Image: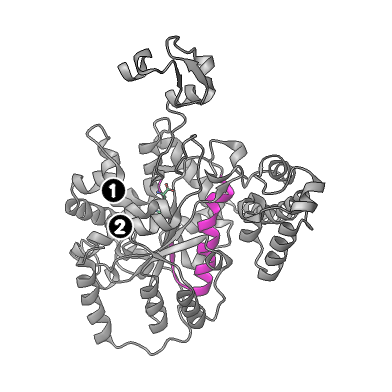
């Protein structure tokens, strides 16, 4: 084009990718354009890209050089119209439960919610509700990032004393991972169940199930819920939420209905003492609210269930949600721990020595190059991955504040900061490994058997509820559920 040619007076042009100057009439070789350019062409490096988050894609935004930026969680919350967790909400939580909010709430690892206040209302009245979380068993090993929602859910179960269901979406993984077979994922589900049990859940209050095993044999009501739900939701609705298109397999298109109806109490008649063989699902059970702790990438499923819960024949309230941030990769902000990139993550099967090596070699540091520079200029804890991990694994606020202060002032060296982090992670992983060794097949079976659960809920409810009130709320749940999400 003329504007690029000699007539325009330009005899040189900069390549977009590398800022290298090459003469315009001589086509640059690939080497001249540099590796960065080649990777961009292969689609590996994306520049100036907005962040992309859904259940199957978690990618941070990139700058003009293709470098990953940190995730912008406030933007996610704004875009999806969730509420950020604030101090008044945590104060109310503490006043009602008598428990100091978990450090992951205080320090923003769980940063956003939908209707947590309604769950607190329930707890205050002494009404039943249940917890629901899950995992897609895509491999037999979990990294620290995978464990966050389980460690946190165990804490919530202790605080609220309520039933918990854990859904293992082996069906989802076989459908969405081209290479995985249905046989493989069922075995992963069993191994993952053992991992999950290691967080110390109370078997009396916890039901863990694999979709492929529970639903065909004992989950008739869950399947009924899924069929009824799928009848309410058309392809346009899931296409938008999940990015499906005409070549998406029909299994993938149906699957969201299952993950959604797992939030309805009627999917587990055994837990509440309802008859699982009846054609009818209990109206009263359908009205039991649900709280879902999950990674924020799972929100699209639960928006869908919130939009449709009130349209079911037996109406359920919109499930409440607690959203977690992604656990940073060792390499720093914008990365998410990934099971397929071994050096991005600390695995729960890592040895103590591997943990030490990974933190020392890969954890992104906000410190200076040398000891002398660190003492003179100080480090930056805000971008330091070891410091961030410390804030997630040490409950002591004063100690954390002192570490940050000492690091900034250069009193604490990078090696010393890493040593603190290594010790905390080793303790966390060791405790897990010791518990895991005790989970036998029989223990696993006891958690995975459909049965009636036992819980007590709030020991000091505000006032016992009359039958009339329960009936009113059942009605209300119906109309509230019918509103827009
Ligand atoms: N889809 C989730 C995953 O791939 C698993 C899951 C199912 C889940 N139900 C959930 C996660 C509820 C959190 C909350 O990991």
Pointer 2 residue: 303
Cβ atoms at labels 1 and 2 below 8 Å apart: yes
Residue in the image at 49% along x and 34% along y: 65
Q: x, y percentage for residue 365?
A: 67, 46
Residue 477 versus residue 163: which sits nearer the camera? 477
Q: Find residue 288 and report its image quarter.
A: bottom left
Q: Main secondary structure of the magenta part?
A: helix
Q: Quadrant of the image for the C terminus? A: bottom left
Q: Residues within 10 Å of mark 2 (few under 14, many from 20)?
A: many
Q: Secondary structure at mark 2?
A: helix
Residue 83 versus residue 220: which sits nearer the camera? 83
Q: x, y percentage for residue 44?
A: 46, 29
Pointer 1 residue: 241
Residue 154 shown in magenta? yes
Q: Find residue 125 and report its image quarter.
A: bottom left
Report, in whole angstroms, how far the alpha carbon at label 1 lies from the one at label 2: 9 Å
Magenta stretch: give its range: 142-169
Residue 170 shown in magenta? no
Q: Earlier in the sequence, mark 1 or mark 2?
A: 1
Q: x, y percentage for residue 468?
A: 24, 86
Left or right of 263 in this view: 403: right
Residue 133 versus residue 340: which sits nearer the camera? 340
């Amino acid at each position: 084009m003329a504007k690029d040619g000699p007539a325009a007076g330009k005899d040189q042009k900069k390549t977009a990718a590398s800022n290298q100057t090459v003469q315009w009439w001589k086509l640059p070789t690939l080497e001249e354009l540099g590796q960065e350019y080649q990777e961009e062409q292969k689609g590996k490096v994306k520049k100036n890209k907005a962040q992309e988050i859904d259940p199957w894609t978690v990618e941070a935004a990139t700058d003009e050089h293709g470098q990953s930026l940190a995730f912008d969680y406030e933007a996610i919350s704004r875009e999806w119209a969730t509420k950020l967790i604030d101090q008044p909400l945590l104060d109310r939580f503490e006043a009602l439960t008598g428990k100091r909010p978990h450090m992951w709430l205080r320090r923003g690892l769980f940063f956003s919610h939908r209707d947590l206040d309604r769950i607190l209302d329930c707890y205050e009245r002494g009404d039943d509700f249940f917890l629901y979380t899950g995992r897609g068993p895509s491999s037999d090993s979990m990294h620290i990032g995978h464990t966050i929602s389980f460690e946190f859910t165990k804490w919530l179960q202790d605080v609220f004393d309520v039933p918990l269901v854990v859904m293992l979406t082996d069906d989802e993984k076989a459908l969405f991972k081209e290479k995985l077979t249905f046989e493989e994922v069922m075995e992963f589900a069993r191994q993952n169940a053992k991992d999950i049990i290691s967080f110390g859940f109370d078997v009396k209050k916890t039901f863990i199930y694999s979709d492929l095993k529970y639903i065909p044999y004992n989950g008739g009501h869950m399947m009924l819920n899924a069929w009824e739900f799928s009848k309410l939701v058309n392809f346009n609705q899931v296409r938008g939420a999940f990015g499906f298109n005409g070549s998406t397999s029909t299994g993938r298109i149906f699957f969201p209905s299952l993950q959604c109806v797992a939030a309805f109490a009627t999917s587990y008649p055994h837990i509440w003492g309802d008859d699982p063989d009846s054609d009818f699902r209990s109206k009263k059970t359908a009205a039991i609210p649900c709280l879902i702790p999950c990674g924020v990438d799972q929100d699209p499923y639960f928006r869908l269930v919130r939009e449709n819960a009130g349209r079911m024949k037996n109406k359920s309230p919109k499930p409440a949600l607690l959203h977690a941030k992604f656990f940073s990769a060792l390499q720093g902000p914008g990365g998410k721990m990934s099971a397929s990139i071994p050096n991005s993550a600390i695995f729960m099967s890592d040895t103590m020595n591997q943990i030490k090596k990974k933190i020392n070699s890969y954890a992104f540091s906000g410190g200076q190059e040398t000891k002398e520079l660190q003492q003179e200029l100080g480090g930056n804890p805000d971008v330091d991955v070891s410091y961030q991990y410390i804030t997630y694994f040490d409950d002591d606020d004063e100690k954390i504040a002192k570490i940050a202060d000492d690091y900034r002032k250069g009193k604490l060296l990078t090696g010393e900061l890493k040593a603190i982090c290594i010790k905390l992670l080793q303790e966390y992983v060791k405790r897990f490994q010791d518990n895991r060794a005790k989970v036998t097949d029989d223990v696993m079976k006891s958690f995975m058997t459909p049965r009636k659960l036992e819980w007590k809920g709030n020991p000091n409810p505000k006032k016992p509820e009359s039958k009339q009130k329960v009936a009113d709320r059942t009605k209300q749940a119906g109309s509230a559920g019918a509103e827009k999400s």
